Image: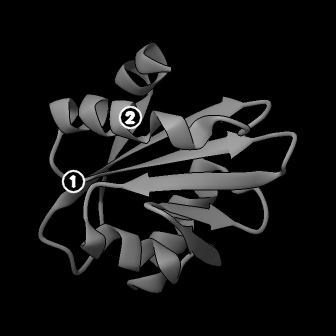
Amino acid sequence: MQNSLLLDHKTVSIPGQKEHLTFAQVTIWDAEDIFTHGAQITEIMDSITPDWVVSIIALHERKNYMLASSTKWKQYFMNLPKANKFNHWLVTDHMLLRKEIIKRMLDSNS
């Protein structure tokens, strides 16, 4: 997962926000133990940038598991893809690709 996060992330400029957001997405089959990787994911992403979100698509569950760098970004994403809080994670009720989430972000600020 470390290589995926380091090599496949995009920086997005969001209208109305001062910060640029770095957005990484990883696809896995089963999210059974994903919650045990939160600290590792946070450490990797913090080494890239202070403002980030990671979306992990779990194909088997057909959901996104999202982790964000701050409470501000967690709140922001709570309103975009209908997401529920679970510990430090946001869990969507269906799968969304990064481009779909970014489009919703840009559309919600236009």
Relative image position of residue 69 (x, y in whole percent): 27, 55
Name the amino acid type tagged 2: Ile
Give the quarter of the figure containing the C terminus: bottom left
Q: Nearer the viewer, residue 5 or 87?
A: 87
- Crowding at label 1, few (<14), some or many (≥20) Cα neighbours within 10 Å? some
> From the viewer's perspective, is 16 left or right of 88?
left
Q: Earlier in the sequence, mark 2 or mark 1?
A: 2
Name which residue type carries label 1.
Asp
* Residue ID at (74%, 41%): 58
In the rendered view, does 44 fall on the left or right side of 83? left
Asked where in the image residue 31 lies, by quadrant, the reply is top right
- Residue 72 on image: x %, y %: 26, 74
Question: Could you say which is closer to the camera, residue 27 or residue 40?
Answer: 40
Q: Secondary structure at mark 2?
A: helix
The numbered dot on residue 41 is 2
The nearer-to-camera label among 2 and 1 is 2
The disc at residue 65 is none
Colour scheme of the rendered structure = one colour
Compute the Cα span from label 2 to label 1: 13 Å
Q: Secondary structure at mark 1?
A: loop
The residue shown at (55%, 44%) is 35
**Residue 92 drawn above or below residue 39:** below
Q: Position of residue 75 (x, y in %)?
A: 38, 79
The residue singled out by tag 1 in the image is 51
Residue at image coords 43%, 41%: 38
Q: Residue placed at 82% from the left, 40% from the top? A: 59
Q: For label 2, count other residues whose C-alpha is less than 10 Å away and answer few (under 14), some (14-19) or many (20+).
A: some
Please say if 48 is above or below 11.
above
Question: In the picture provided, is 100 more to the left or to the right than 36?
Answer: right
